[in-house]
Image (tube, rainbow, N blue to C red):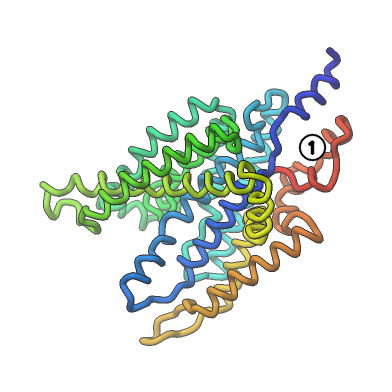
Amino acid sequence: MPEDVGSRIEARRRPASRITGVDAARGIALLGMFVAHVAPAVESAQVAELIAIADERPRLLFALTAGVGLGLLTGATRPRTADRGELRRQVAIRAVILILIGLIVIAELRPLVIVILDVYGIAFLAMLPLLFLSARVALAAGAVSLAVTPAVAALAERDPAVRAAASGDAGIVVEWFITGAYPVIIWVPVMLIGLGLARLDVAASATVRWYALVGVLAAAVCLPITASMPENQVLGADTAADWVIPVRASLETVGNVGAGLGVLAGAVAVTALAVAPVRRAASTLLSPITAMGAMPLTIYTGQLVVLSLSKRVGPGGVATDDSWGLLIGLIVGSMAFAWLWRRYVGRGPLEVLLRAASGRDRQDGAGGAADGTRGRQKGRGDT
């Protein structure tokens, strides 16, 4: 078979690189980050517990969908073979740009939230040698390491030597990998799980049922256990109870990733696997959130700009940006902007710049010319 014919057949068989349910789940993660960043303190314990759902789960769901995106970018169920070096180069360029954007935002805008962009870029760099793992290896490595790395991070952030290193010249590196709010040693296992799901076909009904069940079980078992365990323990204060610190950290993270798997499964199920009327209704209702998830860099960075402009001095002379009005404005404004931009323009503006800088457009142009599949929908391809 001629090489160009084989390439065209492989391109037609390869699953779509943009899946509505994955974008919807990523959009939900962005909304959760908005709540975590801007929701003000409340007196009601019940409302506070509801808001607290957004403290940890959205960022882990974001990492999970990032892993799925990397899996789709690199061939989904049929990992690409001919251009692996080029794909790694593209991911590396994107990673470096994300790091630079994150550091610039931190230095210039100084938002009152922890910025994820630089850590996101570091995690992408860490994923470079892992991009083409098989489904079984990626899922096994992700699951095993996820059971261990949160415990390591919890112990490390309480260790005097690690804390001293975090406050030294190499402090930002220590925070990136171990002690930060989004340590790479936790993000990479979650991204590996997402990569493995893409290798299994994240939108296939059998795959969705499987990871939905695993996610629900993980959340149902781990989260109630962690809720009954003490938190904020000081390492060494009670040596008999020191074991609680790492065990609680790992169980809580596994449970929260399980919740993320449930959200991802639900989003994929209602937009791709349900009966036609439900699919149409769900896709329409979720379209503003899906549009946000299709341009996460634009929406997330835009949020940081808004937050930096919204800083004010609150009661007691403490700087704040929390308000219900700002939260509602961020949610409604982001959904409206994303929906209109995606409908009438296409990719998000920062996604276009990131894609062009990494050379992805040039590769797609060559591939599209060869197989005749260039078009508006394909133009909204990979994450």
Q: Secondary structure at mark 1?
A: helix
Query: Residue 236: x, y in percent?
Result: 15, 51
Residue furthest to the top in view is 1
Query: Residue 70: x, y in percent?
Result: 61, 39
Residue nearest the observer in this picture, 226 or 103: 226
Residue plotted at (65% across, 33% down): 74
Q: Is residue 227 left or right of residue 140?
A: left
Residue nearest the observer in this picture, 267 or 140: 267
Label 1: which residue? 363
Q: Is residue 8 above or below residue 24?
A: above
Query: Residue 202: x, y in percent?
Result: 58, 37
Residue plotted at (82% across, 26% down): 8
**Res 104 → quadrant:** bottom right
Residue plotted at (67% across, 28% down): 84
Q: Is residue 352 above or below residue 203?
A: below
Q: Is residue 11 above or below residue 21?
A: above
**Res 148 → quadrant:** top left
Q: How many marks?
A: 1
Tell me if residue 50 can be seen. yes
Q: Is residue 380 left or right of residue 165?
A: right
**Crowding near the residue tagged with mark 1, few <14, some 14–19, many ≥20 C-alpha atoms within 10 Å:** few
Query: Residue 19: x, y in percent?
Result: 66, 44
Residue nearest the observer in this picture, 320 or 374: 374
Q: Is residue 225 left or right of residue 54?
A: left
Tell me if residue 297 can be seen. no
Q: Is residue 76 left or right of residue 355?
A: left
Amino acid type, residue under disc 1 in the picture: Gln
- Quadrant for the N terminus in the image: top right
- Quadrant for the C terminus in the image: top right
